[in-house]
Amino acid sequence: MAIATISPTTGKTLRTFEVLSSEELERKLQRAADTFRSYRETSFADRARWMRRAAEILEVEAGRFGRMMTEEMGKPLEAAKAESIKSATACRYYVTRAEKLLRDSPIDVDGDTAFVRYQPLGPVLAIMPWNFPFWQVVRFAAPALMAGNVGLLKHASNVPQCAIALEEIFRTAGFPEGAFQSLFIETSEVNRVIEDPRVKAVTLTGSEGAGRAVGAAAGRAIKKVVLELGGSDPFIVMPSADLDKAVHTAVSARLINNGQSCIAAKRFIVAEPIAQEFERRFVERMKTMVVGDPMDPKTDVGPLATPGILEGLHAQVQESVKAGTRLLLGGKPQGGPGNFYPPTVLADPPPKAPAFHDELFGPVATLLRARDLEHAIELANATPFGLGASVWTQDANEQRRLIDGIEAGMVFVNALVASDARLPFGGVKHSGHGRELADLGIREFVNAKTVRIT
Ligand code: NDP
């Protein structure tokens, strides 16, 4: 069954869903176009009232939504509830700022009246992943709806109940019918939706492969596209760093969301003089992490979302070890029902190993040693990705050099890379293009119309 809730903890199929027929899809696309015509005329005050209500629902019902996320994709329950509450912060951010961010920007041109006016584009298709099934959607929807666009969600096929819940949240909050609709369609139908003249733009969060397919389809249709793809984020630790804090953060950074986050730190690049000590402490701490039922509050690491993710990850680990990478911890699926993979530590992969250059989407960390700062930057940049980077040093010159030298969309100094409604989020290289959140995020899906009056 293509669209279904299949428990990653037990492997059991819990619910299945029908895909939309051609007629149903057509009705939804038409409803989006019809709704946009009136919705674009609504005031910021009305949109803010509805969005504030959406934030309240996300907060009040965090328990229910949390259980739904955990059941469908396996993240620990507390993290799932926190995701619902965090999603409310993105709604509230744009409730208070959207109008200001989209106010006409005046420009001084030889005494003429000139300005840029920001107008909504229309229905925007959002193709979203399962790993943060609420947050990824809300961080698209909150700015898009506040800007006067309407949303069409093609959610990942393994989180259908989350997709239904999100549509309900916006409807219950007061947004007009058709302002935010979920489309139960297969990926083979996505191109047809992108090509449809009623759809004006596309955003995708997901894998590099999906990014290439969606980017190509949007290119053929000459439509704006934002791509937020994978990452193989470096976590650089220099000798002046607070080692204790760096190790604690490193383990959390790798295991967040059962290791399935685009901005999880994946490659730990440590300066030679402290590399051995870092390795000892890191492995010790990874060993203490509890793998188990994500509904159990004692669990640190739940199952991977699908059997396919588990198989792919294990193949990358095996290939890396075969290529000469040292295996320091874990390295084998746990067996039994559910997609469980233990915290795993690899070290010193050669450049041909997947652990050196690919994204490993699960609880597998790769340790690398750097001779000096320039070597650390060279290793950090030695992958096709460029999403986030976490760098640890007390030295101001090193901080400056790292901020300038790392090819990434985001650099966090002495901190975990984390998304936040107030900070622009996105990458370079194969991690995609465009930005979500903050001021840049709300300006992605608008027509920045230049006006000059002489
Ligand atoms: P995908 O990229 O396959 O899925 C993300 C979304 O894109 C889903 O809604 C999926 O639909 C859709 N999709 C997939 N292929 C296409 C296509 N050709 N055209 C249009 N839409 C498409 O991610 P996976 O679930 O397969 O995860 C695999 C890898 O993706 C991970 O190992 C990781 O590297 C990366 N990833 C990155 C994420 C991030 O946050 N940047 C999030 C999730 C994954 P459907 O579910 O129906 O296939």
Image (cartoon, helix red, strand yellow):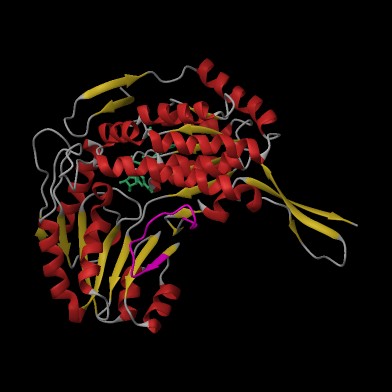
Confirm whether the magenta stretch covers residue 423: yes
Q: Is residue 448 left or right of residue 427?
A: right
Q: Which residue occupies the foreground of this view, 323 or 282? A: 282
Q: Is residue 412 above or below residue 20?
A: below
- Left/right of residue 214 with respect to residue 160 in the rendered view: right
Q: Quadrant of the C terminus?
A: bottom right
- Residue 8 seen in the figure: yes
Query: In this image, 302 relative to 202: left or right?
Result: left
Residue at point 51%, 17% (across, down): 24
Q: Identify the image quadrant of residue 414.
A: bottom left
Nearer to me, 219 or 278? 278
Q: Quadrant of residue 388?
A: bottom left
- Tell me: residue 186, above or below residue 316: above
- Image location of residue 258, percent across then percent down: 24, 47
Reply above or below: 337 against 116.
above
Give x and y (percent) for residue 119: 69, 44
Query: Picture coordinates of residue 398 (x, y %)?
Result: 37, 81
Residue visible at 43% across and 25% down?
Answer: 184
Give the position of the N terminus as an image quadrant: top left
- Which secondary structure type mostly characterizes the magenta part of the structure? loop
Residue 11 located left or right of residue 82 = left
Residue 310, position as x, y percentages in the image: 20, 42
Give the residue at x 23% y 44%: 312
Q: How many marks?
A: 0
From the viewer's perspective, is residue 395 above or below residue 139? below
What range is drawn magenta here?
411-425
- Report ligand 1 position as a quadrant: top left
Task: Mark yes or no: residue 122 visible.
Answer: no
Is residue 379 one of those drawn in magenta? no
